[in-house]
Amino acid sequence: EELQMKPAVESIQRESEGGELEEEELQMKPAGDGFDVTPSIEQRIQAKSGSGSKMDGNTLSGMEQAFGADFGDVSIHNDSESGDISKSIGAQAFTQGKDVFFANGKYDPGSQSGQELLAHELTHVVQQTGGSKS
């Protein structure tokens, strides 16, 4: 079974260990037209959840000040596997909860376009997590 996803927002529904349905949003910045998320891609995303790196101090403080939110527990995924996952769903970057995944070469907080993409994804973090204030 494949989940059809739209470029802006889509929900992923799966059954928890207790048999209850859980719904999580997967939000992304599209690289092109439509995309599909297969169960194997969803499993790869879940396996990486929480395991990324943290933003460097300057980037973190700048984004927290701009948003008025605490991003200290946001995980940045910019390794080759995260790049492959992003590419497979046609995304420059996507967010699930406090995990932000980037296509290869797209995490570049030192550039204007990199900051804009990161800010876009952090907006989704705030939307999905309720946006805790710093």
Image (cartoon, helix red, strand yellow):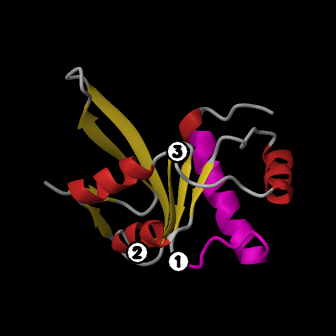
Which of marks 3 and 1 precedes in the sequence?
Answer: 3
Is 74 on the left-hand or right-hand side of 33? right
Q: Secondary structure at mark 2?
A: helix
Q: Quadrant of the C terminus?
A: top right
The residue beneath circle 2 is: 87
How packed is label 2: few (under 14 Cα within 10 Å), some, or many (20 or more)?
some
Q: Amino acid at mark 2?
A: Lys
Q: Is residue 116 magenta?
A: yes
Q: Amino acid at mark 1?
A: Asn
Which callout, 2 or 3, points to the residue nearer the camera? 3
Is 85 on the left-hand or right-hand side of 62? left
Which callout, 2 or 1, points to the residue nearer the camera? 1
- Helix, strand or loop for the magenta stretch, by majority: helix
The residue beneath circle 3 is: 50
> How far apart are the two marked residues, 1 and 3, measured between alpha carbons?
19 Å
Which of marks 1 and 2 precedes in the sequence?
Answer: 2
Residue located 29% across and 51% down the image:
43
Q: Amino acid at mark 3?
A: Gly
Residue stretch rendered in magenta on the structure = 104-127
The residue beneath circle 1 is: 104
